[in-house]
Structures are given as structure tokens and as C-alpha cells.
Amino acid sequence: NAGVTQTPKFQVLKTGQSMTLQCAQDMNHNSMYWYRQDPGMGLRLIYYSASEGTTDKGEVPNGYNVSRLNKREFSLRLESAAPSQTSVYFCASSEAWGLGDTIYFGEGSWLTVV
Amino acid sequence: EDQVTQSPEALRLQEGESSSLNCSYTVSGLRGLFWYRQDPGKGPEFLFTLYSAGEEKEKERLKATLTKKESFLHITAPKPEDSATYLCAVQAWGATNKLIFGTGTLLAVQP
């Protein structure tokens, strides 16, 4: 069972470079999310897509853009990477964004911006 | 402001030594409280959801409980394979599915 798949697993960028993190889920979930995890900060929501065709800002959206390509895929783009965006990024999905839904996370993408 | 605080930050136990992890929360109206397990280099994995004070959930050596201000994750007779970071998150009413995560407790169980 693949679940939520993220690519790449590791990436080193130079300041100012752009890149896209890809995410796909095979559980037929309606909602998808991008989180970042930093030491001492906990997981923070960057953007989410409650359903195909919609996207909304989360807690820390500045410097990021997202695209819900179809029901399965949700990408995160860094247009001009900054050292402050060095983090571990997690994609997640859930059947819907109502109470009681469990959220399934991918294995993470380690991004370093130098 | 909605907030989640977990303690301790790190906990080292001997195999078989039971203990509890704490998750204190401040939220305007609790819709649900979630516990996750996170292994090194992996994403969080769902363990429990608790909805109301007094509720308890169990899974193998883990039991989660909930009061109006905090939740406890009790670990009974832990084994080395229980070593992981345990995350707590809360979801508030009107927050459009936003989960507020704590910073986690790193548990190490030594044989």
C-alpha cells in the first residue's frame, strides 16, 4: 500500500532557486495538505486543498504556492527559496476535512536551502 | 490563542517501566484531540482521536485519556519498539480542519 508518496526525499537548493515538491495519494481522499516541521516548532500547515479544485492558505503560506493537479496530486512550489525554508515537508491527505477523519502523512521531504 | 504543550520533551524508560506523556491544551472549543506516533525519518502515524472529557482509547500498550485541559498517553510495560516521538494535536470548532500540533515527546525505551 503506497498511501501518500512524496518526491524528492532530499533536496539541496541555493538561495533564490525554485523547486516543486510532488505529492500523490492513492486512497481516493478528497482533502490534501502540506505541512512543514521544524525543531521546537511542531508541524505547521502551509496550504491545504479541501477538495479537488480548491486550495487555501494555512498558517505559514508566505513563499509557497500550491497546485491541486487532480484528485490524487497536490504539489508545493518554492518560487525563490530562502534559508528560512530549510525544513522537513510533509504531504498529507484525508477522506474529507470533517471531524473524526484521520490524516495520513507521507514520509517527508528534507529540504536544505544554502 | 489556541495552543498545545507537550511534556516532557524527552523521556527515557527501561523496558517494562510504565509512564505517562502529557498534552496540555488551550482551545476555544475542542472538536477533537489526536495522538500520533512519529518514527525517525518518517511521517506521523495516527494513533487515537478523543472527542470529549472522560473518553479513553486503548491500543496494545497505549491508553489515551482526555480531560477538559489535558490528555495523557499512558504507556504500560513499554518495549524498545515503542521508542518514537509522540505528537499531540487539537482541532477547534470553526477552524476548518486546522490541526494545532505540539512539539512532541521523544520516548526512548531501553532493553
Image (cartoon, coloured by chain):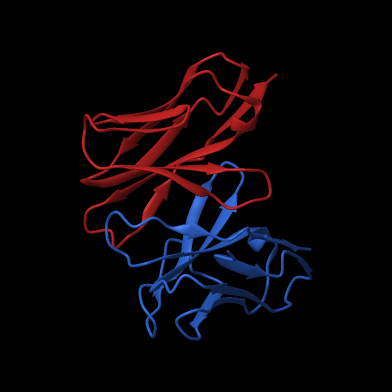
Question: For the point 51% across and 40% down, which residue is it?
Answer: B103
Question: For the point 32% across and 65% down, which residue is it?
Answer: A97
Residue A27: give x, y in percent of width and height: 47, 70
Could one spot residue A22 in this view of the protein?
yes
Image position of B39 with respect to A36: above or below = above
Question: Which image quarter: residue A54?
Answer: bottom left
Residue B105: give x, y in percent of width and height: 54, 32
Could one spot residue B1 in this view of the protein?
no
Residue A29: give x, y in percent of width and height: 41, 71
Question: Which image quarter: residue B25?
Answer: top left
Q: Is residue A99 left or right of residue B39?
A: left
Residue B94: give x, y in percent of width and height: 22, 59
Question: For the point 36% across and 73% down, which residue is it?
Answer: A50
The quadrant in which the C terminus of chain B is found is: top right
Instruction: State how many labels appear.
Output: 0
Q: Is residue B79 left or right of residue A26?
A: right
Which chain comes out blue in the rendered image?
Answer: A
Of the chain colours in the picture, the one used for chain B is: red
Q: Is residue B91 left or right of residue A61?
A: left
Image position of A62 with respect to B99: above or below = below
Image position of A65 with respect to B77: above or below = below
Question: For the point 58% across and 64% down, which residue is it?
Answer: A1
Q: Nearer the viewer, residue A25 or A16?
A: A25
